[in-house]
């Protein structure tokens, strides 16, 4: 289980903007620890975002995505109180899903 | 300066060994998920990545806006923002041409999702960020160099 994501989804003029901050080490597998041993690769490979159960974004990450990945995207539609859910999967098979309600951006 | 080639060889060798073990057991490792293209994410150069995609490097398009810093003091966190007015865009790919694995991220955009994404990537050294956008089945390119004063590969 990863740490909870921070997600904000806000609708304005018929477009919902989703901001996601995931908590993950995103180890490349190329870095060495203090003892000189390679730190094994450990990174998010897939992210899926859904609005009311419908997929609105599918992302695949390589090791080059920064630690604690940050992602912003926008989709048409969305209304206050509707749900946006985000889930990720990493290369060790760990997953995390979180959900927020869309707010109105003023 | 660390010996990148040696580190790469170690990594590749280890990975191949693991694949061999799994193959002999008839098992698929957990990261071999259908959606994640291990081969493409392991591409070491733009040419290799383009070969895997089955494309030649497309012409640059003025209809893609790529926002990256000119100078990144910290290569571990380089903000990247892509947007495009190209109609019927379905995919955005973000590459860093000098990274050990050039493909940083891929985004599939279902109908109704804007051609826009912001994220942050690691850059090991000064390199060119190359973005490919697929629209109406055709690839378009935007590219910008980012000068990195401190590499983001740690170690």
Image (cartoon, rainbow, N blue to C red):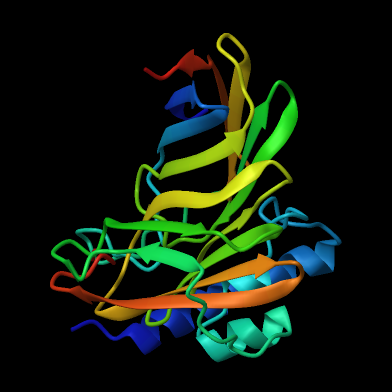
Residue positioned 49% across, 32% down in the render: A18
Placement of the C terminus of chain B among the 4 image quadrants:
bottom left
A46 displayed left or right of B80? right
Q: Quadrant of residue B132?
A: bottom right
Question: Residue B74, how many percent across, how many down?
Answer: 17, 61
Q: Nearer the viewer, residue A56 or B114?
A: B114
Q: Nearer the viewer, residue B93 or A36?
A: B93
Most extreme residue toward the top is A81
Q: Nearer the viewer, residue A68 or A19?
A: A19
Q: Quadrant of residue B124?
A: bottom left
Count the marks: 0
Residue A43 seen in the figure: no
Placement of the N terminus of chain B among the 4 image quadrants:
bottom left
Question: Residue B44, how many percent across, how many down?
Answer: 51, 83
Q: Nearer the viewer, residue B35 or A32?
A: B35
Residue positioned 60% across, 23% down in the render: A84
Residue B107 seen in the figure: yes
Question: Residue A92, how many percent across, how many down?
Answer: 58, 46
Most extreme residue toward the front is A13
């Amino acid at each position: 289980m990863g740490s909870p994501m921070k997600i904000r989804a806000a609708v304005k003029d018929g477009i919902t903007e989703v901001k996601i901050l995931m908590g993950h080490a995103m180890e490349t597998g190329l870095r060495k620890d203090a003892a000189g041993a390679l730190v094994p690769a450990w990174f998010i490979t897939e992210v899926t975002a859904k609005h009311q159960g419908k997929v609105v974004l599918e992302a695949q990450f390589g090791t080059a995505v920064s630690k604690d990945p940050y992602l912003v995207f926008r989709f048409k539609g969305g209304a206050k109180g509707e749900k946006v859910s985000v889930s990720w999967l990493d290369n060790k098979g760990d997953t995390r899903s979180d959900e927020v309600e869309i707010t109105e951006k003023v | 300066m660390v010996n990148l080639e040696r580190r790469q060889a170690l990594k590749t060798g280890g990975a191949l060994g693991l694949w061999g073990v799994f193959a002999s057991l008839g098992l698929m490792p957990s990261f071999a998920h259908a959606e994640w293209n291990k081969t493409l994410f392991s591409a070491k150069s733009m040419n290799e990545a383009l070969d895997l995609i089955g494309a030649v490097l497309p012409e640059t398009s003025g209809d893609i806006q790529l926002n990256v810093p000119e100078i990144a003091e910290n290569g571990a966190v380089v903000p990247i923002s892509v947007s495009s007015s190209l109609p019927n865009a379905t995919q955005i790919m973000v590459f860093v041409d000098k990274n050990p694995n050039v493909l940083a991220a891929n985004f599939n955009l279902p109908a109704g999702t804007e051609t826009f994404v912001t994220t942050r990537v690691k850059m090991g050294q000064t390199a060119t960020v190359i973005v490919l956008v697929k629209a109406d089945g055709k690839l378009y390119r935007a590219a910008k160099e980012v000068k990195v004063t401190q590499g983001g590969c740690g170690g």
